[in-house]
Structure formats: C-alpha cells, structure tokens
C-alpha cells in the first residue's frame, strides 16, 4: 500500500541567524535535523529525502537543489526528480528548523488518514499565516504543480511555495499548539530552549567549531 514520504529542506541561508546552519542548532540535546528525522522514523515515514548540503550521517536520501540556494520550490523539484518519492501517496514537506516535529508529523498523519479524495493538501495555519513548509501533499498533486510551474516560468529558482501550491485543493487546519513553530531568529531559539529548559545562546554541533556556517563554496 502506498505510504507517506517526507522531504526536509536543509539548504537555506539563515540570514537572520548570521548564516548559522539552522538544522544543526541543538535543542534538548539533539540537533533540529536529528529531531525531525527521529520524529519521522518513529512515525514510520519513509523515505526521508533531505534537500541541501550533507550535514550529518542521518539515514536519509540526500539530493541537492539546482541551483544551490534556489529556494524551496527548487528543492521540492530536486526531491521529486530524484525518483525517491515514486510510489508514495503523500509527501510531508518540512522545513529543517522545526521546533516540534513530533507534534506536527503526528497531526499531519492523523489528518491525511481521513481526508476526502478531492483534498490535495493538508496545510496548517498559524494565525493568518499558511505554513506551506509544515504541510502534507498528495504526491500526484505535487508533481502536477511542478509541471505547471515549469510551463509558466523560465526557472523555479526563487519561486515561493505559495506560488507553487496555492492552487491546490487544501484542507486548512489550525495550529493550536505551536506545532509549526520554527527558528528564524536568535529570539526564536532562546524561546525554544527556554521551553526545553536549556540555557545559553546559539549553539550547534560539532561543538569544536566556534561558528557553524557553511559558505557558498562548501554548499555547492
């Protein structure tokens, strides 16, 4: 029976965090990426496709968006183009800096198990904001959306998730418990660590480095 796959985006520039590699920030003694992969593994979501530079030794399929730093739609296209999602009915599209991946994955799986056939996506809203990178998408709908985008545009470089996905038949769900929270700023990180009873400022592994950044040459 067709199951659920996941695409985790790990290749952003993190300008508001000074170029820090966000998926390698630690929370509760684990990196954000390890927490996401762990939540997906517990939920038996396979395969897991990480799009971006190689950041750790997690048991995931690794692909790279073209061009590097080409944005989330270029990343989705790389994952679909890899063939790793073939045969999966649903794809969880997740940012690599989620604070509560366990809550989010459980909620998305619960919702996709009961949606009507005409529903193509399940996407949370936090306040008035659509959380496209915390959603579940029918693989077939995602493939068709990418095909339409390639017809309408010369390049997927820089295209937003909203532009790609807003035409889908979406079941909107309300984020009532912060399950879509992510880390965009130092303040976000401090709040997340306080909630996990962690002290200190930004810290990433490997701890022997004074800074955890990957420059353009390393990411390419």
Image (cartoon, rainbow, N blue to C red):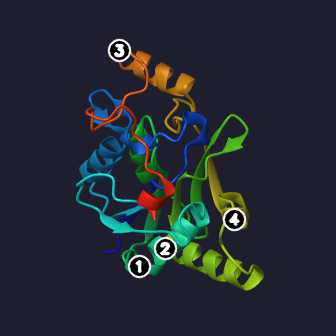
Examine the image and state in which quarter residue 14 appears. Answer: top right
Residue shown at 31% from the left, 59% from the top? 45
In this rendering, position of residue 114 left or right of residue 1: right
The reply to whether residue 76 is in sight is: yes
Residue 147 horizontal/vertical position (percent) = 63, 83
- Label 1 and label 3: CA atoms lie apart by 40 Å
Q: Relative to 30, does residue 46 appear above or below in the rendering?
A: below
- Label 2 and label 4: CA atoms lie apart by 14 Å
- Label 3 and label 2: CA atoms lie apart by 37 Å
**Pick the front one: 83 or 25:** 25
Q: Residues within 10 Å of mark 1 (few under 14, many from 20)?
A: some
Q: Residues within 10 Å of mark 3 (few under 14, many from 20)?
A: few
Residue 82 numbered tag: 1
Residue 159 numbered tag: 4
Q: Which residue is mark 2?
A: 78
Q: Which residue is mark 3?
A: 197
**Pick the front one: 196 or 54:** 54
Q: Are marks 1 and 3 in contact (CB under 8 Å)?
A: no
Residue shown at 68% from the left, 82% from the top? 150
Give the SS element for disc 4.
loop
**Pick the front one: 36 or 111:** 36
Q: Residues within 10 Å of mark 2 (few under 14, many from 20)?
A: many
- Label 1 and label 4: CA atoms lie apart by 19 Å
Q: Residues within 10 Å of mark 4 (few under 14, many from 20)?
A: some
Q: Relative to 124, does residue 87 appear above or below in the rendering?
A: below
Q: Are marks 3 and 2 in contact (CB under 8 Å)?
A: no
In this rendering, position of residue 174 left or right of residue 138: right
Q: Are marks 1 and 4 in contact (CB under 8 Å)?
A: no
Residue 154 horizontal/vertical position (percent) = 73, 81
Q: Which residue in the rendered view is the most extreme toward the bottom?
A: 151
Q: Are marks 1 and 2 in contact (CB under 8 Å)?
A: yes
């Amino acid at each position: 029976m067709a199951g659920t796959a996941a695409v985790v985006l790990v290749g952003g520039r993190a300008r508001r965090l000074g170029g820090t590699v966000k998926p390698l920030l630690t929370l509760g003694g684990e990196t954000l990426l390890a927490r996401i992969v762990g939540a997906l593994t517990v939920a038996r979501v396979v395969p897991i496709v990480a799009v971006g530079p190689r950041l750790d030794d997690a048991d995931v399929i690794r692909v790279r968006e073209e061009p590097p730093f080409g944005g989330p739609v270029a990343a989705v296209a790389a994952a679909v183009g890899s063939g790793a999602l073939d045969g999966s009915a649903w794809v969880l599209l997740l940012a690599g800096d989620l604070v509560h991946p366990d809550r989010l994955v459980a909620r998305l799986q619960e919702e996709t198990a009961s949606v009507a056939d005409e529903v193509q996506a399940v996407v949370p809203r936090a306040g008035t904001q659509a959380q496209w990178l915390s959603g579940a998408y029918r693989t077939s709908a995602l493939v068709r959306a990418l095909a339409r985008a390639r017809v309408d545009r010369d390049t997927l470089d820089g295209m937003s998730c909203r532009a790609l996905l807003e035409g889908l038949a979406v079941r909107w769900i309300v984020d009532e418990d912060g399950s879509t929270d992510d880390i965009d700023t130092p303040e976000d990180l401090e709040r997340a660590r306080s909630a996990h009873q962690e002290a200190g400022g930004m810290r990433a592994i490997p701890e022997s480095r004074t800074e955890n950044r990957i420059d353009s040459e390393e990411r390419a």
